[in-house]
Amino acid sequence: MRRVLLELARAAALLAGVKERLAFERALRDPRKAQDAVLARVLKSLSETSYGRERGLKPEDDYASFAAKLPIVDYDALKPYVEEQKSTEASILFEGSARFYERTSGSSGGSKDIPYGDRLWSSFQRAFSLWLGDLLLNGPRLKTGRCWISVSPWAEPGKKTAKGVRIGLDDDGEYVKGWLGKVLRLFWTVPSAVRHICDPDEYKLAVATYLLADAELEIVSVWNPTLFLLMLDTIVDSRDVLLKRLAQRGTGAARLDALCSALSAPARKDVDWGLVWPELKLISSWDMAEAARPAAALAALFPHASFQGKGHLATESPVTIPWIDSCFCLPLVDSVFFEFADASGKILRLHELKTGAEYDLIVTPEGGFARYRLGDRVLVTDRHQATPALALAGRCDDVCDLAGEKLDARFVTKALDTVCPGAAFRTLVPVHEDGRTGRYALVLDHGACSPEALDEALRLSPLYDHARSLGQLSAPTVSVRPDAAERFGRFFAARGARWGGVKQNALVRDPEHGRELARSLDL
């Protein structure tokens, strides 16, 4: 019966997505034409908003007028409009009112709320549907369809704006349209409801229990690979508790015996995870930039499964999806209008990019922020059809990201002003040694700061708080070194900086520099 249901679900998913897939493949063959069509829709929509009218935007404008009338912006520039959107739910930044808001970490403040109207939400749903359809068509042949799909982070239920608009989705299944999302829920190993468990330890135990109960798990799809690694550690560390829970749930004796034997190893690296989930065929997660190391560690634990690097999706906009036929991640060329800044600051369009070059990414999703600088740098890896393939190369702003926390230098500066105002030199260093949980180490030249106070100040950033609560980041540490400024200066001078010209920053952004500093300073 389950096999029949799977085949029906596969057919339904492919049928539902065939029109979108054909449209996407046509767009890939002529990216300039596809981008012109997206821009025309954007101009028509934006001209009906307060933001567009203030800048004299008209539906008949061309790209030159669009670029001349609208500035390239970041969140701080748009924050007054977001606040007006929240207080009025009129057509401020996009047509209509917000369906919900997604909360993520900000720069000058602790958080930022991203409004999702119908058009932007549909763009994310389309990206997910395209990925799922491509996986069902060209990915590994599934027998059970059982999957763990974690689309959005651990959430606090019931959050709403003053106008009653919810913050966050109630159910990850809402990222898949209509009846197809309801069908997919039948195959989910971990129900979406667990993301509303507010106690982080109980959340991890609940997810781990569901995962262990399912011997037929075939697909794991998470955004950050550290989340799955964290669940594996939870399984090893809480083996007895989890086996007891499984027995109380009525898990069969054969499954319990198999788990008891497989989980007898003392550490994650010693477990034969193929015995835990023998049917696992695919793991999908980020594997670019700083996620490359944990992704490689995760793939090494599951040699019997394929590993697929995820595309590039920001809270503000979808960007790329993996496309199996191409072996690359391809931009959503017919859903988002793309611009790129080269090293000289010149703005280019998608069809003008050169293979092998890196660019700062600027996006205008339908129903989203216009000419929005995401702060991400992308590398053009190749071309599929006529469309450049894009890979995330890293951040181009003052952000550090070990486990999805995206700490911003301006936010860190404000936090340090609170917890160690007297230090002449203070720098927060990312520390992420191989095989260990990441953390941040604060280095001061004098004075004092408790790690607890530092942690509390940094937890005002929602994504940092999320990573700390789940254990993806360990508690920060504090080291007082009277010669800190000199040692930091020598460190960066040895790497090409002009001696005496090394700037003191509140945050070391490059995790590789953080690893080297941790070793040299014994942090």
Image (tube, helix red, strand yellow):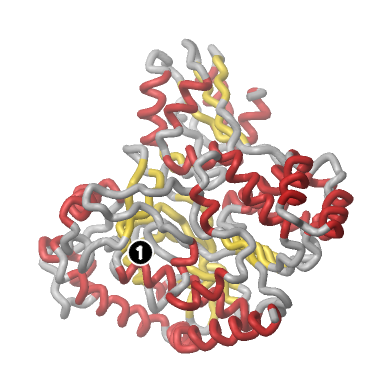
Q: Please identify the quarter of the rendering in which residue 3 is found.
A: bottom right
Name which residue lies at 65% across and 52% down: 228
Residue 181 appears at what percent x and percent y? 49, 72
Tell me, yes or no, if residue 74 can be seen here: yes
Above or below for 48 versus 449: below
Pointer 1 residue: 363
Question: Closer to the camera, 174 or 460?
Answer: 174
Q: Given the image, on which type of amino acid does mark 1 rest?
A: Val
Element on which disc 1 rests: strand
Above or below for 304 versus 343: below
Residue 322 appears at what percent x and percent y? 57, 71
Above or below for 437 versus 164: above
Q: Please identify the quarter of the rendering in which residue 14 is found.
A: bottom right
Question: Closer to the camera, 177 or 17?
Answer: 177
Tell me, yes or no, if residue 472 can be seen here: no
Q: Please identify the quarter of the rendering in which residue 63 is found.
A: bottom left
Residue 238 appears at what percent x and percent y? 73, 40
Q: Quadrant of the C terminus?
A: top right
Decide if residue 281 is on the left or right side of residue 403. right
Q: Residues within 10 Å of mark 1 (few under 14, many from 20)?
A: many
Name which residue lies at 45% across and 19% down: 425
Decide if residue 318 is on the left or right side of residue 36. right
Above or below for 196 versus 359: above
Q: Quadrant of the N terminus?
A: bottom right
Question: Closer to the camera, 436 or 376?
Answer: 436
Name which residue lies at 73% across and 69% down: 281
Decide if residue 116 is on the left or right side of residue 397. left
Name which residue lies at 27% across and 57% down: 72
